[in-house]
Image (spheres, coloured by chain):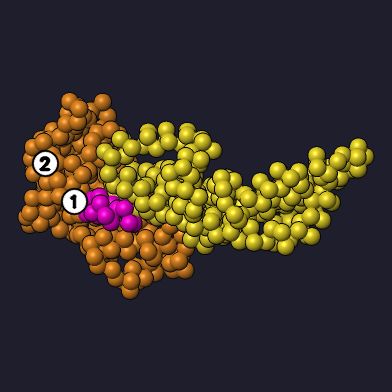
Amino acid sequence: MKHLIQKGWRPTAVLILLFVLWELASRLFAIPVWLLPAPSDIWLEAINGWEQYNQHILSTILLSITGFTIGSSVGLLVAVALHLLPNVREAVYPLMILSQNIPIIVLAPLLVIWFGFGWLPKLIVIILVCFFPIAVSTMDGFRQTDRELMHYMKMAGATNGQIFRKVEWPQAIPSIFSGLKIAATYSVMGAVISEWLGANKGIGVYMTLASSSFRTDRVFVAIVLIMTMSLLFFGVITQLEKRTTKWKQEEDESHG
Amino acid sequence: MAKLSIEQLEKSFDGQHILENLSFKVDEGEFVSILGPSGSGKSTLFHLIGGLYTPDAGNIILDGKTINGKKGSISYMPQSHALLPWRTILENVMLGGEIAGKKDTKRAQEMIEKAGLTGYEHAYPSQLSGGMKQRVSFIRSLLSPQHLICLDEPFSALDEFTRLEMQHWLLSIWEKHKRSILFVTHNIEEALYLSDRIIILSNKPASVQKEIILPFSRPRQEDIMLTEQFLQYKRDIYRALKFMN
């Protein structure tokens, strides 16, 4: 906690300063609320509008978590499979990178055409955005083996399976976590994008409705909600990481 | 009967002749050092014995059985400690046994105690000093089920003081748990202080240049390093190595 205060006071101070400037500017120049609401207006809407958006939050959270879980599992499985089959990796890896260059905004309407307006196209969008960071970082993690360590394992008579379980997998765990962290924030974004396409619930829907009726204050509420969700998600994974990779922290401490 | 015999070993990599007609033996419970200039193929020799590669010609015989290209027959301690950073010391020293399917926590605990690492069982390698990591690495090879231990310049990355301390420590542990040891080094004093026998390799392609049987008694005392006899051996070996270049 003390650590958090020590490290966090500077950015917090900057943030507060920004809000104060923003508030002052909107009052001084009398900027209309539909153009740019002051932080106080957004705050009021966030409190008073709870009835309006609480149902949307739950739906988005559910969608992101489901998509994230499936997406990261698929990413992990693909990474393991490609690692164990180097020939297939060489054939597929460039295509995977290419696939990431397709803008998700373009792909999403196509998915709706193919799969309708249900949960499936939305899930696919999230799975697609989560899959890639995890697959790539996991594969990188598998390949960071120390040569002497591999020699040791092989000379000790370790089978390929043992090498994978005892060396490659545990060594990839920190990389897997960095992939998971990226995917977690992407998953919330993916969920919101997929909700724009047509849904009856979700932060994405709330946001579209708000902007089309010039309720800019609500758009900002939606932005705050999305940021909070991403941060929460990120925090949960960071905590999990801290528990699973105790050895890594010892390492960082003794080198740092 | 010899524990390990190397018979007319030949190996080339990419047209480079590395080992040529290399033959020597290690007896049961014997400490043999291999001394040679850097890049003389010492590591290749270990990789061959460890079964990472197969020799182009010749045989590697362990306990009467040919082990050309067969992995898992020796216990190996590499130049860097090669400990798994995510395992505690206790889990690390049991790795060799674990690979062979025989885990013995009690014995591991005993060895850690004997090695003077009590209290570090549940520490991670990053919390240990360089010398301590090498100790853990050596205990790991002692706890492995294989009877021949191959050490590849294990102390070369340590400072002089730690190195002396580690040599002394290695002998004290080894003299209690007699195993056959094949020890690669480029440090003449180290080879003289530790071994029963020294094999000097020639420059590439490596073959046995000279073999020296050392008369020093066991348990070894540190002060033999200052005796005239020790220095005489050192001069001889130095000349033999110098002569090659």
Find residue A94 and report its image quarter.
top left
Mark 1: give few (<14), some (14-19) or many (20+) Cα within 10 Å. Answer: many
Spatial separation of the CA atoms under disc 2 and disc 1: 20 Å
Q: Which label was assigned to residue A41?
A: none
Q: Amino acid at mark 1?
A: Lys
Residue under disc 2 on the same chain as residue under disc 1: yes
> In the rendered image, which residue does mark 1 sit on?
B71
Find residue B211 and report its image quarter.
top left
Vertical position of residue A35 compared to residue A241: above or below: above
Q: Secondary structure at mark 1?
A: loop
Q: Which residues are magenta?
A: A153-166
Which chain does the orange colour mark?
B
Residue ID at (74%, 56%):
A5
Residue B52 seen in the figure = yes
What number of labels is visible?
Answer: 2
Q: Is residue A157 magenta?
A: yes
> In the rendered image, which residue does mark 2 sit on?
B23
Residue ID at (22%, 39%):
B44
